[in-house]
Amino acid sequence: MNKPLFTVFVIAYYPPKYLTIVVESIMNQTYDNLEIILVNHAAHTDTVDYINKVRDADHRIKIINYEYNLITASPPESGIIVWNKVLSVSKGKYILHISDDNVLSNNYIEKMVGLFENNKECTTAAGQVVTIDCNGEIETKKIENGVRTSNYRPIYMPGHLLALDRLRKGRSRMFSSPGGGSIFAIKKSALVDAGGYHKGVERGIDFGIVPFGITGFDEDAVFYWRHHSRQLNQELLETGCVGSKENLDLIEDCNIYGKWKVFGDSVANYVVKELVRIEYKNAAWWLVKQLYRFRIKSAFSLFSAVGFKPYFIFIAIPFFMVIQLKKIKNIWIFK
């Protein structure tokens, strides 16, 4: 049986505490025809030493070096430049990104390749997502009272139905993942046809790539998503970089309405309206949090990125009132 080359890449920045775990989980996959790309994103010295060491030990590993970190630079640049650099040099038929603090079950890539190869219409694939803490202990409750609470869906399904489930008011039942679209393995040709990774990474994959093909799922493949305070996305959130502008830009950059019209005008209108509503809601919540913590600079940065919209302000006001009421309640309880 011909085993297609599969590219998996990790962008390294922090000290190698978790990086060593994820790299070992990749190197120890049951599927061995891998191209492993490690990106030195101006990483710590210990991290650079580590990735050079494993590169020397495993011929499948390649390294891309950056002299400075695009995300933390002043002024910051879009980190998606790095993702698309990897895409441009990758050789695999399929490609998967994994953060430097997450972990794959040792059968993960084998299961993803199986999903792709057994259905030629399959353009994206994912496994079960399980949240773990900083010590690797499982946080996610996948089953309660014998009933699966999330991530239950067919092995194959039209991608647009999964994307629509993501827009449900409340929690998605078919696809519950802190990382959203960024955890999908993707057929490289589909990703290239879509113009590569968009700066609104998760939304770009969820609504610009997944909908336009069959998406596969194997619950026996586990993607362990580590939740901890030193995540880069958490640090960015605290500075007001919540990704709302990037996600709003996605609608025009990727012609979301035009692409979704293949499923009907009403569906396309619904998707665009919901994406706008969700982003303004998220931005309003974070704006209020920044103001509440007297982080004026971060709040101004967020407000400037999203722009003055009456809808935005209308959402922010009730959020502010809720926080004030909670504060008053806590004071009363304290007394």
Image: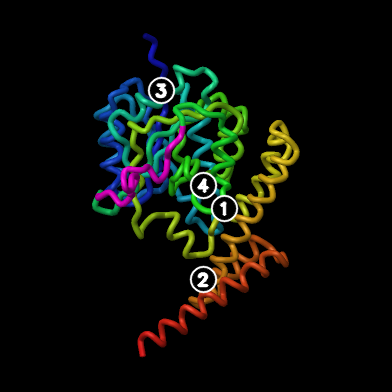
Give the structural element (helix, strand or loop) at label 1: loop
For the point 47% across and 21% down, the residue is 93
Q: Which of marks 1 and 3 is in front?
A: 1
Tag shown at residue 169: 1
Lateral position of residue 322 relative to residue 270, left or right: left
Residue extent of the magenta highlight:
137-153
Mark nearer the N terminus (2 vs 1): 1
Q: Residue furthest right?
A: 265
Q: Name the residue under label 2.
A: 289
Residue 218 shows up from this direction = yes
Q: Label 3 near label 1: C-beta < 8 Å?
A: no
- The residue singled out by tag 3 in the image is 113
Q: What's the amino acid at mark 2? A: Lys
Q: Is mark 4 on a helix, strand or loop?
A: loop
Dot in front, 3 or 4:
3
Instruction: Give x and y (percent) for residue 102.
Output: 34, 44
Which residue is identified by label 4? 79
Q: What's the distance in space between the residues labelled 1 and 4, CA to CA? A: 29 Å
Q: Pinpoint residue 172: horizontal percent, then vertical percent.
A: 50, 46
Of circles 2 and 1, which is in front?
1
**Label 2: which secondary element:** helix
Quarter location, residue 58: top left
Residue type, numbered disc 4: Gly
Q: Please identify the quarter of the rendering in which residue 220 is found.
A: top left
Give the answer, above or below, for where 28 lies relative to 332.
above
Give the foreground label among 4 and 2.
Answer: 2
Residue 79 placement (x, y as % from top left): 51, 47
Q: Residue at x 41, y 82 (%)?
A: 330
